[in-house]
Each structure stands twice: as C-alpha cells, then as structure tokens.
C-alpha cells in the first residue's frame, strides 16, 4: 500500500517487496477499485464556487487521415474543477452539448457559481441555463488568462493525467475509467493537503466491509 501511495509502479513494487508481479498487480487493482467506489459515492455532490470546465481526448493512437479530436481509439473526457478544492472527471460518448450540459446541470449550481471555459461551442448553451457569470478565454487568439478568468488549473490537471498515464505502456479500454479516477483521487488528495497513505488506508477499512 505504501508503494501504491508513493505512485510506484506494480512491477517495481514487486521487486522491492520480493513478491510475484501478478500479486502486486492484483493489490494495485484492488486499491484502484476502492478509489473508484469512493469517487462514485461522491459523484452527486453539487458544487458552488469558481468552476473551470474543459474537455480532452485520450489515447493518442494515430490513425491515417484522422487527427486531433477526430482520431480513432480516443476516449473523450469531460473535466470539472472547483478552484482550490476538488476536481471531477467524467467519460462521455462525445463532447457535444447533448453530452456535456446534463453533467454540468447535475454537478454545478449555475446561479451561485462562476464558470470559466474556453470557446468550445457546447458551452454556448450555459446562457440558456441561467448561468449568471460565465467567462471565456479564446485560445485561438492566444488568450489564456484575463485576471482570474482562466482555465489554467484544469489544464494543469489534464497535463498531470496525461503525463502520469504515459508511464503505463498500455491500458485496456475496460480499465481506463479506473485509472482516470485514480488520477482524480491523487490530485484531490494533493489539493486538500492530505496524506495519501493514510487516506487510502482509511478507505480500505471502510469499503472492505461492504
């Protein structure tokens, strides 16, 4: 558990603990499932504060004639971040308004929050949802911040996820959501200035009983 908390890979932990790699991988999978259950239990929490929204595409596998957002084999992820407090990730079928708006309505109190986004078209509908304060930055015009109006925090988290997940040579589609929630959990623990090992041990005691 300590090596998992320190974000050491299962193969390296197996060497340090002098155990079989499969055993280490099973324990790591167990910890990730507990983190996923914990995240699922807190998914319906409503946020009221300064919120940053962004969307991204994982799985940079190159497909001929398809680039960037339209490249095949990519997982679409919607990101929400409550500044100085918490981040939330959600895998979506696509990044259209039909997919994103219901998540926004279910997660954010729009009348009591300040929303920061880029100029991605689906965010146009936030005005119709009574979002009183919605600020946008236009990256295509090299605009990345206007005083407190930016999405730098969520972009920082997205960069952290991509860097961290690259150390795993390959993640199956069926397990990607668990790895994503692990990144979310680790970032939230860092934001709250908690001890990762103690937090994980506490969750194991709670969810192992269920």
Image: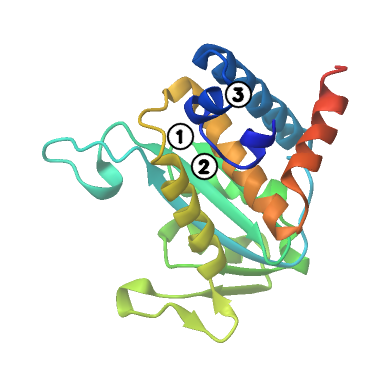
Q: Secondary structure at mark 3?
A: helix
Q: Position of residue 34 (x, y in %)?
A: 72, 26
Within-10-Å neighbours for mark 3: few <14, some 14–19, many 20+ = few
Q: Secondary structure at mark 2?
A: helix
Q: Closer to the N terminus: mark 1 or mark 2? A: 1
Taking the view exactly as shown, the residue that stands out farthest to the bottom is 147
Q: Nearer the viewer, mark 1 or mark 3?
A: 3
Q: Which mark is residue 99?
A: 2
Q: Closer to the N terminus: mark 3 or mark 2? A: 3
Q: Is residue 82 above or below residue 174?
A: below
Contact between labelled residues 3 and 1, with CB atoms less than 8 Å apart:
no
Q: CA distance from mark 3 to mark 2?
A: 44 Å
Taking the view exactly as shown, the residue that stands out farthest to the left is 65
Q: Can you identify the residue that label 3 sits on? A: 17
Q: CA distance from mark 1 to mark 3?
A: 40 Å
Within-10-Å neighbours for mark 2: few <14, some 14–19, many 20+ = some
Q: Is residue 149 above or below residue 172?
A: below
Q: Residue 30 lies in what quarter of the image?
A: top right
Contact between labelled residues 2 and 1, with CB atoms less than 8 Å apart:
yes
Q: Nearer the viewer, mark 3 or mark 2?
A: 3
- Left or right: 194 in relation to 11: right
The colour scheme of the drawn protein is rainbow
Residue at position x 49%, y 30% in the image: 12
Q: Position of residue 124 (x, y in %)?
A: 49, 63
- Left or right: 56 in relation to 130: left
């Amino acid at each position: 558990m300590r090596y998992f908390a320190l974000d050491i890979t299962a193969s390296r932990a197996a060497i340090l603990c002098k155990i079989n790699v499969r055993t280490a991988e099973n324990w790591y999978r167990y910890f990730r499932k507990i983190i996923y259950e914990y995240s699922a239990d807190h998914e319906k929490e409503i946020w009221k504060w300064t919120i940053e929204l962004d969307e991204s595409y994982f799985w940079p596998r190159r497909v001929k004639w398809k680039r960037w957002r339209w490249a095949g084999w990519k997982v679409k992820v919607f990101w929400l971040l409550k500044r100085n407090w918490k981040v939330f990730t959600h895998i979506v079928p696509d990044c259209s308004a039909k997919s994103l708006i219901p998540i926004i309505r279910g997660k954010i109190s729009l009348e009591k929050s300040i929303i920061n986004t880029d100029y991605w078209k689906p965010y146009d509908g936030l005005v119709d949802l009574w979002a009183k304060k919605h600020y946008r930055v236009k990256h295509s015009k090299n605009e990345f911040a206007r005083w407190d109006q930016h999405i730098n925090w969520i972009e920082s988290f997205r960069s952290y996820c991509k860097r961290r997940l690259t150390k795993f040579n390959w993640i199956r589609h069926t397990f990607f959501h668990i790895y994503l929630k692990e990144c979310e959990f680790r970032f939230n623990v860092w934001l709250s200035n908690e001890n990762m090992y103690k937090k994980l041990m506490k969750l194991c005691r709670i969810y192992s009983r269920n």
